[in-house]
Amino acid sequence: MPGKNLEFGKQAEKAAIRFLKGRGYKVIQCNYKTKFGEIDIIAEDKGVICFVEVKARHSKLFGEPAEAVCAAKQRQISKAAICYLKANNLLDHSARFDVVSLLYVEDLPEINLIKDAFELNSTFTV
């Protein structure tokens, strides 16, 4: 089952990338890894760096996909984003956190984009 879930996740990320590109996003990097965690997609949208979390589900049995981006996950993504901004000398650049939610119905995804899904807590330091 883990291999199947991994493949499902990769399929969802590819669909999310196509979706974002169709809305004018420029994808910079995928699967950015740090010691704090991973960012699924880093993209640029109208001059703003977007750290995008992709969440996909086969059903709503356990809630909407985006609901899985809990406070702990937000902190993890935020810390990884700070690492990216520091490493690329972009701390003074505009940035935001988006979530792409995919709910697969009969093998076709219903895709929703939540811009500014959450904010960076100003007390974070890395």
Image (cartoon, rainbow, N blue to C red):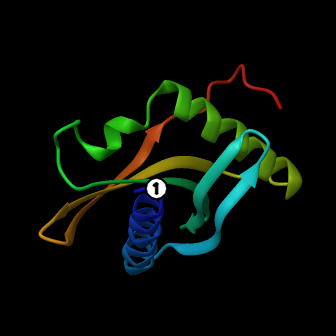
Where does the image place residue 97, in percent across and percent down from the top left?
53, 46
Which residue bears the numbered disc 1?
Answer: 2
Q: Residue furthest left?
A: 106
Pick the residue in front: 112 or 37: 37
Q: Give the residue displayed 62% in from the left and 25% down from the top.
A: 121
Q: Position of 5 compared to 78: left or right?
A: left
Above or below 93: residue 120: above
SS type, badge 1: helix
Q: Is residue 31 above or below residue 15?
A: above
Residues 30 and 49: in front is: 30
The quarter of the picture where residue 68 lies is: top left
> What's the residue type where badge 1 is placed?
Pro
* Quadrant location of the C terminus in the rendered image: top right
Tell me the quarter of the image containing the N terminus.
bottom left
Position of residue 64 relative to residue 99, above or below, is above
Report whether 114 appears left or right of 47. Answer: left
Residue depicted at x 17% and y 50%: 59
Q: Name the side, left or right, on which 30 lies relative to 35.
A: left
Residue at the (65%, 50%) spot, across then down: 38
Q: Nearer the viewer, residue 8 or 81?
A: 8
- Provide residue 76's location: percent of width, then percent of height: 63, 35
Is residue 91 in view? no
Work out whether 91 lies above or below 102.
above
Residue 105 lies, in percent from the top left, at 13, 64
